[in-house]
Image (cartoon, rainbow, N blue to C red):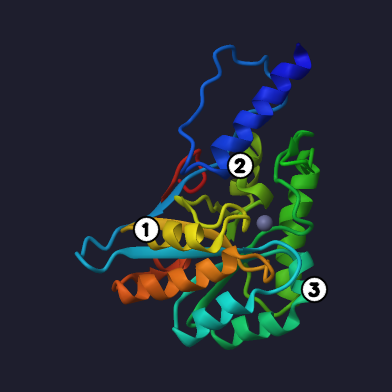
Amino acid sequence: MKHLLLGSALLLAAASSAFAAEVPPAVPAHPPVAAGPKLVEPHLHIARSNIAGHARVALTFDACMGEADERILSTLVNERIPATIFVTARWLKRNPKAVAVFLRNPDLFELENHGEKHIPAIDKPVLVYGIPSAGSPDAVRQEVEGGAAAMLASGIPAPHWFRGSTAKYDLSAIGQIRAMGYRIAGYSINGDGGSLLGAAVTEKRISSAGDGDVVISHINQPTHAAGEGVARALVDLKAKGTEFVRLQDVADTGDDKTTE
Ligand SMILES: [Zn+2]
């Protein structure tokens, strides 16, 4: 019975976060007993432009590990679309050419901290999508500080925003990271479903971004179909008159005490 309940809980958790747009929030008829820390996946919005035909949108991309997605990177550069890129120490090490492109275009790219090893910034032991969390306050601190140190070593200015692997946290880790001086970057539109969605649905999700939205997607999966949809959506949004901003350029509102 315990296994059944746990299995249902995991399924519900996976469905409600990874496919938030398709599945309404599910409430189990018999909530399982508390297993592990309460996790939140915070939302973030930016101040609206309130100008018809010029929705203001912040595009954020995670560079978790692996390679650089040239389809997205070249579109951002060629179309002169500003974006905020969250990089890990692991990704920086493997992608010096892409880092050089970011640094050559400081008017386009704000680089922020996605951690050292790409482990969830949760200070208690738990698995998120099968990934073991940092598991202690010391390990959370190391994940954040290690990410920042790698950025500085790559010639990137000191970061002011942090987004942890899986974008999930427990509240005490949020308090700890805020006390380290960071704002924590949630999002309002899950653009590419962790880079696992098809090109058409990804294009549709991102193109639907409205005034004040913060879009999360990935720039580190060049072999996934989602990236093709991301690149097309950038052109769609530009054609609609979208005002693209980076997180450092605008006021914002995050829930779960991530920015206040
Ligand atoms: Zn990531």
Q: Give the Cα separation between the discs numbered 2 and 1.
A: 29 Å
- Which residue is depicted at the point 41% across and 76% down? 235
Mark 3 Cα shell of 10 Å, populated few (<14), some (14-19), many (≥20): some
Q: At which x and y percent is residue 97?
A: 71, 85
- Most extreme residue toward the left is 52
What amino acid is found at the position of numbered circle 2 in the picture? Ile
Query: Which of the two residues, 211 or 198, is positioned nearer the viewer here?
Result: 198
Contact, mark 3 vs mark 2 (Cβ under 8 Å):
no
In terms of secondary structure, where does tag 2 sit?
helix
Residue named by callout 2: 174
| 110 sits left or right of 47 in the view | right
- The type of residue carrying mark 1 is Ser
What number is the disc on residue 93?
3
* Crowding at mark 2 (Cα within 10 Å: few <14, some 14-19, many 20+): many
Expressed as whole percent of the image width and height from the top left, the position of residue 88 reads: 72, 63
Is label 3 in contact with label 1 (beta carbons under 8 Å)?
no
